[in-house]
Structures are given as structure tokens and as C-alpha cells.
Amino acid sequence: MDSDTLQASPKLAVIDYGMGNLRSVLRAWQHVGADAHLVSSPEEIASADALVFPGQGAIVDTMRLLKETGFDHAIRDWIAADKPFFGICLGLQALFEHSEEGDTPALGVFKGQVKRFRIDPSLKIPHMGWNAVSFAEGDPITEGLVSGQDQFYFVHSYYIEPEDPALTLFETDYGGRFVSGIRRGNCYATQFHPEKSQAKGLQLYANFLKSL
């Protein structure tokens, strides 16, 4: 293996299915050393080392666009093959079976529901801004992070309820504890936005890259 191969940056395919400005996600991954590119068709992900599924907006539109582009099948197949995957915000929620937002069937990669916050009226919805995440020690993606202290940026009105508690990687408190990140094999996904979470978010992305 020559030196160029040894130093090659991991190739990340960032799904562009037609919603939102993905440039901040792309720049964050590039900043930590990834060879990251936007892809707009499933055929473009074949040579990637990892697949990134950013999400924002409404899940009704997201699911429609995933089906129209064929990324619904591509995401399911990718995770089923245990290839490295990182989902962000709606890219987490869409992995479950059903969302209360628009009564929407989702990808069904994992069993569980996406539910709207029903919390103390004094707490604003959406849950927006900085909040701490808690996690058990030992997962390589949390290297250099401090459970219960380090904060990440959130903006969401819905949260996931996985059937399998073993999926839970991160938890956050907002009028009660909810799951703010999952892991299964090489599949990671977070409710918060690492790309908007400054140094700690970049640390999370860098840790993911190290596993590739």
C-alpha cells in the first residue's frame, strides 16, 4: 500500500434529496478531514466509505422525496449491510417506523415511534438551542467528550421512542429525558446538529471518521 493510499481521506456521501441547505453539514465534515461530497442519486454512493443523512424540515416532505429519489431503499440497504452511517436530526427520526408529524410512515429501519413533545407549557416547543447530552462511557464516538456537561445544538418538536433500549447512545433532558442519539453497529444518528455545535460537534464527527 503506497503512502497516498495510507493518507487518503475517508469518502463521505452526504445525501442531497432536495431539502434544505446542506452546506454547513458538508463544510463540517470537510473541516475534520473527510472527502465529503453531496450526492443526489443512490448510484453515487457505491464508492463511499460512509453515508451521511442530514435532515431538516417536515418528515412528510422528507419521506416523499426519499421515495421519489430511491434513497429510501438505498438507506435501508446500506444500514442492513452494516456500512458506516451517520444520521442527523430528521436523519435520525426517519429511521423509525412512524412519526406523529403528519401521521407519516417512515423508513422502519428500527422499531419505534417519533412523538411530539408533550411537556410543561412553560417549556417552549420546538426545543431549540443548547442542551447537554448524557452517555455511557466507552463508545469511540464519545472520545474527548464529557457526559452530562458538553452541550450540543438542538432544534426539534418531535423525539424518538425506540422499542429497543439497547439502541440508546445519547440522552437529553427537556421536560423529561428523551433519546437524543442511537447506535447499532456502524449506524449512528443524533437528534442534535453536530455541525451547529462548534468544537464538540466537530469532535463527534472527527471521532466517527477515525472508525472508518
Image (cartoon, rainbow, N blue to C red):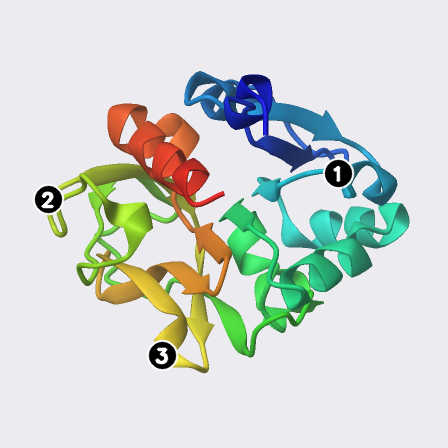
Can you tell which mark lies on residue 149? 2
Query: Taking 59 as reference, is 10 left or right?
Result: left
Give the amino acid type for the residue marked by disc 2 in the picture. Answer: Gln
Q: Label 3 neighbourhood size at 10 Å, few (<14), some (14-19), many (20+)?
A: few
User: Which is more N-terminal, label 1 or label 3?
Assistant: 1
Give the amino acid type for the residue marked by disc 1 in the picture. Answer: Ser
Q: Is residue 53 above or below residue 81?
A: above
Instruction: Confirm whether residue 22 shows in the render.
Output: no
Quadrant in which residue 19 is drawn: top right
Q: Secondary structure at mark 1?
A: loop
Instruction: Confirm whether residue 97 shows in the render.
Output: yes
Where is residue 161? Give x, y as percent.
43, 73
Q: CA distance from mark 3 to mark 1?
A: 33 Å
- Towards the viewer: 122 or 149: 149
Q: Is residue 146 above or below residue 129?
A: below
- Towards the viewer: 127 or 185: 185
Residue on which disc 3 sits: 165
Give the amino acid type for the residue marked by disc 3 in the picture. Answer: Pro
Where is residue 189? Give x, y as percent.
47, 53
Q: Secondary structure at mark 2?
A: loop
Can you tell which mark lies on residue 47? 1
Q: Residue furthest front?
A: 1
Residue at 36%, 41% (x, y): give it: 154
Quadrant in which residue 51 is drawn: top right
Q: Secondary structure at mark 3?
A: helix
- Towards the viewer: 91 or 139: 139
User: Which is more N-terminal, label 1 or label 2?
Assistant: 1
Residue at 87%, 45% (x, y): give it: 69
Quadrant in which residue 8 is drawn: top right
Q: Name the mark nearer the viewer: 2 or 1.
A: 1
